Amino acid sequence: MATGAAAALGFLNQESRCRAGGAGSLRVPTPVTMDSFFFGCELSGHSRSFTFKVEEEDDADHVLALTMLCLTEGAKDECNVVEVVARNRDHQEIAVPVANLKLSCQPMLSLDDFQLQPPVTFRLKSGSGPVRITGRHQIVTMSNDVSEEESEEEGSEEEEAELCPIRPAKKQGGRL
């Protein structure tokens, strides 16, 4: 009886490996690296807009995470409206006001990592500033460095996994 149970477990173990694509065909996630850099720009009466953009050829994912907008030294007590020009889900350019800063009542605004996909343009729609915009530029890259030996091994393991042997069931004599 113990021999039959061991054979059944062995068969089920091999069968589950074949259905899962073979023991060797489990894919290890691609290594991901993430870099983060400080970002900052200033909008004022002299420079009313700033555009943050990345190279088109870059395969990495770029995210601009805004943390804070604040009035800096020399700002007048007037309304300073900052708007962001970016692309929406349908890839249409839209302009959205994100802050209305005034020295006497709201000199700064926390944006709590408000994430934007480049290219992004910041505009000082009204007021003379200066308004400082701070955040982080995050770069996520996925490494696809697979050597030729590894890709050949994966190919041969996949071929082996596709050819799952069919074993006949063992007949047990004397039982009905």
Image (cartoon, helix red, strand yellow):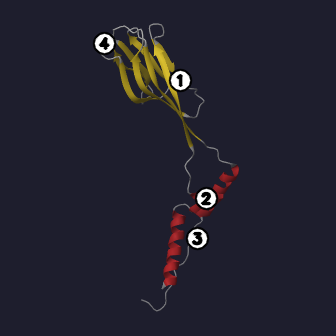
Report which quarter residue 34 is drawn in.
top right
Alpha carbon separation for disc pair 3 and 1: 55 Å
Disc 4 marks a residue whose amino acid type is Ser
Q: Nearer the viewer, residue 54 or 103?
A: 103
Q: Nearer the viewer, residue 135 or 158?
A: 135
* Residue marked by disc 2: 158
Q: Secondary structure at mark 4?
A: loop
Q: Secondary structure at mark 3?
A: loop
> In the picture provided, is 12 more to the left or to the right than 126?
right
* Residue marked by disc 4: 104
Q: Measuring from the top left, give residue 162's x and y in whole percent.
A: 58, 62
Alpha carbon separation for disc pair 3 and 4: 79 Å
Q: Secondary structure at mark 1?
A: loop
Q: Measuring from the top left, give residue 161's x and y in whole percent.
A: 59, 62
Alpha carbon separation for disc pair 1 and 2: 42 Å
Disc 1 marks a residue whose amino acid type is Lys
Alpha carbon separation for disc pair 2 and 3: 14 Å
* Residue marked by disc 1: 53
